[in-house]
Image (tube, helix red, strand yellow):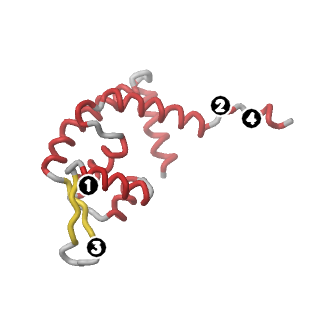
Amino acid sequence: MTLNKYIIDQQVGYLLRKAYQRHLAIFQQNIGYSQLTSVQFTVLYTVNFLEGCSQKELVEKTAIDQATIRGIVDRLIKRELLIQSQDVIDKRKVKIHITSLGVELLEGATDQARLISEKTLDILNPAEQLALIHVLKKLSE
């Protein structure tokens, strides 16, 4: 039987999912007062970085699907961290912008995010950390 040759905890998908679950746990324990989820942080950071964008641009830059982005943006708007407005050039388009409250929250959360990345990788030596980042970038291309 070929099932005996397939060991789930040695498969790349399983291991990536377990590593991601570990990272998410570290994220939630350390994000602090902002109460952002990791994907909310990503969206807020990206909107700030792009200095305003469409949902389509947000999907492209974050690799988060359209339906999920819509829900995240709605929640961040309700928290007054993002706003939407009509595009000045093309009135059919909607642009998403970060609010001053969003910038303030993001500044503190970004410091925490750096710490979270360090904590996620702290079980690896510096060479392993570089190798992991290199391999993850290559896998995500």
Q: Do the residues labelled 4 and 1 touch (CB within 8 Å)?
A: no
The type of residue carrying mark 1 is Val
Q: Which of marks 3 and 4 is nearer the N terminus?
A: 4
> CA–CA distance between discs 2 and 3?
46 Å
Q: Do the residues labelled 2 and 3 touch (CB within 8 Å)?
A: no
The type of residue carrying mark 4 is Tyr
Secondary element under disc 2, as helix, strand or loop, is helix
Per the image, the residue denoted by label 3 is 93
Identify the residue at image location x=64%, y=30%: 9
The type of residue carrying mark 3 is Lys
Q: Nearer the viewer, mark 3 or mark 1?
A: 3
Residue 31, placed above or below residue 51: above
Secondary element under disc 4, as helix, strand or loop, is loop
Q: Are marks 3 and 4 in contact (CB under 8 Å)?
A: no
> CA–CA distance between discs 4 and 2?
8 Å
Left or right of 99? Residue 110 is right
Q: In which quarter of the image is residue 83?
A: bottom left
Per the image, the residue denoted by label 2 is 10
The mark found on residue 47 in the picture is 1
Per the image, the residue denoted by label 4 is 6
Give x and y (percent) for residue 118: 34, 28
Q: How crowded is mark 4: few (under 14 residues within 10 Å), some or many (20 or more)?
A: few
Q: In which quarter of the image is residue 25?
A: top left
Q: In which quarter of the image is residue 29?
A: top left
> CA–CA distance between discs 3 and 1?
16 Å
Give x and y (percent) for residue 38: 36, 40
> CA–CA distance between discs 3 and 4?
49 Å
Q: Which residue lies furthest to the front in this view?
A: 78
Q: Which of marks 2 and 3 is in front?
A: 3
Identify the residue at image location x=50%, y=32%: 19
Left or right of 11? Residue 106 is left
Residue 2, placed above or below residue 40: above
